Amino acid sequence: MLGMTGAAADRAKVLNIYAWPEYFPSALIAKFQIATGIHVNYAVLDSPATAETILSVGHSNYDIVTMNAAPELAREIPKGFWKKLDRASLPNARNADPQVMQMLSSVDPGNQYAVPWMWGTTGLIYNSDKIKALMLNPPLDSLDMIFKKDVAAKFAACGISMLDSWGDVLPMVSRYLHQPRLSANKAELDAVIAKLQEVRPYIRRISTAGYYQQIAEGELCLAIGYSGDAMVARRMVNESHGSVKVDYSFTREMVPFFIDNMVIPADSPNPAAAHAFINFVMRPEISASVTRFIGFATANAAAVPLLEPAVRGNTIVYPPPAIRTRFELQSVYTPEETRAFTRAWLVFKSGL
């Protein structure tokens, strides 16, 4: 919850944002404040589950939240979490990438609630020099790197990490085992957890926060991670004048795809300011400036031509068509399936 100060008592001139770190950099916030006279409070989102809990209670006092399309928005839109957008107030929303909008419409029919902001994939982030020194011709385009015991064992000493997110990891293991989809069926789910437990001795870290910094610093050499985090790790290496060569690969088994969107809570105290902000950041030059800074792919198609060739030509951030045709949004699960997957993940992490 955000407290209101005396200086910010006029709620019509205050915008409360709840978003991932750096999604709206301070320079962007300053430009918006100068242009509109609206003061922005920025609370950092660190977990969609936490955000969902806060929003489900109501009266969160937030005006804009960044939320993943699937499974979060798919689950939350029918529950009335979000306000329908006033498209007349968002002329710049037409700049959104048509392919991203089409995929988003599978969870937001008619694109009524969400404006896509950033997108990316989940794959393998690795320290190229260390990996290639430890194995001749490593299978870098395959989940064999982590889920094949004999391969993972080769990289354990230099540090393997995976996301602390069953929604990301369990479907990848399921696909690796040639299951048609992640299932709560006991035999199939037990097989998924058994595979994870088989390689657990070789996993040094299970975390969604900070693992990319450890890759940049050479403390880890291999991770299941997000494409944008690979770019953050590269930026950290450059800023520290380090020598670690960070690479990223799309796995042949599957290419998980996420879309982070700007949405307005149904009980937002200032939806007018929220619309003004969304329209502001969907200006091509603004979206381009953020992508340059954070390394995630902008969902603003009009911004891409403004990016330098080295940025828009980066195949980690903007994969070639052959990869894009393989994008898969996370499935939406029933409450019973979600409970089963959550329990199974906790059992795996606890080592029981």
Image (spheres, grey):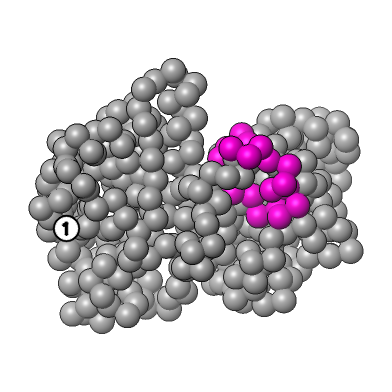
In this rendering, position of residue 123 left or right of residue 27? left
Could you tell me which residue is drawn at 35 percent across and 58 percent down? Answer: 251
Quick check: 12 above or below 75?
above
Q: Closer to the camera, 182 or 40?
A: 182
> In the figure, 29 relative to 196: above or below?
above
Q: Is residue 306 magenta?
A: yes
Tell me if 11 is positioned left or right of 127 in this view. Answer: right
Name the kind of residue labelled 1 in the image: Lys
Indicate the quadrant where residue 87 lies: bottom right
Q: Is residue 289 left or right of residue 175?
A: right
**Image coords of residue 264 (percent x, y):** 71, 58
Count of labels shown? 1
- From the image, which quarter does the C terminus lie in? bottom left
The part of the chain drawn in magenta is 292-310
Q: What residue is drawn where x is 54% and y is 72%?
A: 75
Q: Secondary structure at mark 1?
A: loop
**Residue denoted by label 1:** 148
Q: Split into 4 quadrants, where in the image is the N terminus? A: top right
